[in-house]
Amino acid sequence: MLPFFALTLFVSATLLFLVQPMVGKMVLPRLGGTPAVWNTCMVFFQGVLLVGYGYTHSLSAWKGRRTQIVAQFAILALPFLVLPFSLGSWSPPAESNPALAVLWLLLGMVGLPFFVVATSAPLLQRWFAATDHPAARDPYFLYGASNLGSMLALLLYPILIEPNFTLEGQTVLWTVGYALLVLMVAGCGFMVWRPSVRATLVFTPELPVEAVTAINPAPQQPTAITAAKRSSRQRPAPPSTPAARSSRGAFSEFDQGNTSWRRRLRWIGLAAAPTSLMLGVTTYLTTDIAAIPLIWIVPLALYLLTFILVFARWPVPWVGSPHTVVLYAQPCFLLFLILDMLARLGVPTWFEFFLHLAAFFSTALVCHGELAKDRPAAHHLTEFYLCMSAGGVLGGMFNALIAPQVFWFGVAEYFLAMVLACVLRPRMLEGDWGRTLIPGDSKQTETTVLGRILDWAIPCALGLGGYYLSLLGTAYHAKAYFIAVGVVVVLALAGRPLRFGLALAALIVGVEGYNRGQDPFLFEDRGFFGFVKVRATHRSSGTVYHTLVHGGINHGEQIVHPEERRRETIAYFHPSGGIGQIFAKFSWPDARLPASLVGLGAVPGGMLAGLHSEPPYAVVGLGTGTLAAHARPWQHMVFYEIDPLVKRLSLPPEGQKTYFYYLEDALERGARLEVLLGDGRQTLKADPLGRNLERYYHIIVLDAFSSDAIPVHLLTAEAVDLYLEKLADGGLLIFNTTNRYVDIRPVLGKIAQEKGLTCLTFGDYSKDDEGNEIPDKLGSDWLVMQRRNAWKHGRAANGGVPLDKRLDMKRWQPAPILDGPMWTDSYSNLWRVLQW
């Protein structure tokens, strides 16, 4: 019985965590690959999980076991009505925050299957708890088996499932797995339906025979002496030491079965803090440190691992000595991380990743360990899981839906989750200055008036101290050492959770308040697609630069003073770089627009002017709008941009300030410039104005990034087919392949090879051939494609001149070819192109 129940829970959890990255992979292409998509999906899945746990709690509380089995079989059949699921033709709204649209989409596409699978875990554990198996008294260890399946599914998806199955194949595979789950749940129902079967299958492979005998000793007839002793003997007090509590399952209120509202609220808080922290660390790592693809897998895998550890019964109960060790270690990891973030130590990237993940892992272990230690008796199991799920939903909603609207200046929700986790730690000191308590001791001491005063006075003093410590540290060029003093003081308060959490919050506010005053931004805001900031930099000779920072990545610059230098293309678009060479070589006066401009619906005068203008080009990804500097009078140029905040920087609403002037200057020169909001690929496919743009553009530039990550859906074979449909014969398809973590050149080289395209790459640096820095230049990599039969269909774009006849082939090289399948909308493998 026990192995079959554990295996069924394992399969159920595997399906839950296979569907999440699968659906995320389907939705991400429509929304530019932003991390907010994953956070929104997580909120949806947590919400459906809460509904599933609520259904299970109600069913198990109000109905008998056989009624539960019949009802569960009925809902298990419903998902077959919508399986296998697909995204269809859905597209997000262009002008508004798409979070609600994503939630609505997921509800219709995968809501029912996910809900049904989510009901399995708590219901199966409840069924098992009602059996006469020796382990039924404490069925929570099955939750560890469930999370083991979740973690393995999450880790195996990018390594095994994604590289070997298309999206259509993955949905079919999931449907087959669901059918298997239905059969296994039926088997579990059969076992608990027939008592005679249960009686023959009662065994526990984890425990030796002696342990089973100790749990269920054979009944003996009491003698007169033992009866007399039993009547005169009082019931002993429950054990209070960690070892004794571990021996009886470590339930703080197991025997009484007390589930007060205060206890329920603590369960919710202990579940909400790690969930919020998981999403916060994912956002912080992918925006402020390094936008490495698939990095969200690591925090989620660690999150699941904490559940596996704290609810397991091997090798020792986690709530004993291991939990005590983590209680002492967690403040050290957390405060070392805070020191690094506040003092900006500049440690290597790999070590910063380790600090964030170690602090998150130890904090999640503390919160989940407290949950495991405080779990109730088995008949409250579904209520316990319902509270945990509610906490997960609240933590996820706070990060995905509330924080982006409130914390426009940074990932403040990350710090708040840390503070909440510290406040929820168990009290480890007695009295105001007194003795150390045994970690997890249920003994509570009433806080005195002095204690209440100190709980607030010390944090307030630390907040002011943090500001002045930063000021002194900057003056003496030893800021990290001065802030370390405040960190040590906070660490000394770790034994009192409220004082510890408030002191940590005050220190963060004090130091960050000083830091923001010393490094102000001209503009900063936050939307669904991430953080957008503009920094002003004053350099030599009075030159002033505006820099666009998206996430933690420099996305371009412009010289704003002196004004006569505003049109210069700098940074990644420097004239000596790959894109600069292409525009210099192919923007010839003899390359005029084709007569297809007539079909654009322009006014007759505009048509006539258009026929004598420069060739049209399109850019996917606005950024600072630097490429608008190449636009000439009457030249038609279209930018496709997904983030309204980025458009606002160059074309603001009436009365608001402009931060980048490339577009404004191009419009003043008479260029026919447009900025269309929406995903570049979707908007390019269906023009919002209903125009026919087939074989229209002479140049299409792909310069779209989400922080430093490149949206995969812009790099597939189907995407290239779309670009070629819009590209005139002889036209150029250009990709900005600059990236620190992913080499996409082989991916594009493979697609070009399969489609018979010429494909060249240009590796660029910010230095010249003699090793001298080139002013106002940032290194960048570019790749360009062109049809080989560019001159076949009459007069071609760019004079029909092949790439190798016009570009300097000493710098341009043939693109490398990917050794493997071509990337498509249903197949991609980022592991193959990560730069380790």
Image (cartoon, rainbow, N blue to C red):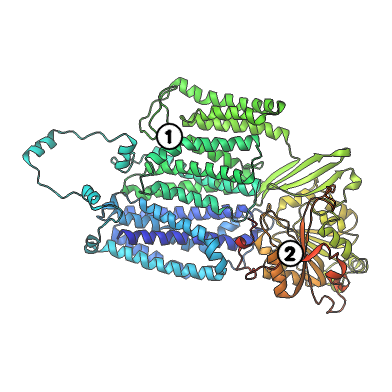
Specify the quadrant of the image occupied by residue 764: bottom right
Residue under numbered circle 1: 426
Left or right: 492 as drawn, with respect to 529: left
Above or below, 506 relative to 216: above
Q: Earlier in the sequence, mark 1 or mark 2?
A: 1
Query: Which element carries disc 2, helix, strand or loop?
Result: loop
- Which residue: 58% across, 62% down? 25
Circle 1 or circle 2, nearest the eye = 1
- Farthest top residue? 450
Relative to 721, 128 lies left or right = left
Task: Report if residue 135 is visible in the image.
Answer: yes
Q: Name the residue at 52% across, 68% down.
A: 171
- Expressed as whole percent of the image width and height from the top left, the position of residue 719 reads 69, 68
Local crowd size for mark 1, using a 10 Å CA cut-off: few (<14), some (14–19), many (≥20): many
Question: Element under label 1?
Answer: loop
Residue carrying label 2 = 688
Q: Position of residue 632 (x, y in %)?
A: 90, 59
465 vs 164, nearest the viewer: 164
Looking at the picture, tell me which residue is in the foreground, 292 or 645: 292
Residue at figure coordinates x 38%, y 54% from the top left: 122
Q: How far is the residue under mark 1 from the one under mark 2? A: 57 Å
Whether residues under marks 1 and 2 lie with C-beta atoms below 8 angstroms apart, the answer is: no
Q: Which mark is residue 211?
A: none
Image quarter hosting the N terminus? bottom left
Q: Disc 2 marks which amino acid? A: Pro
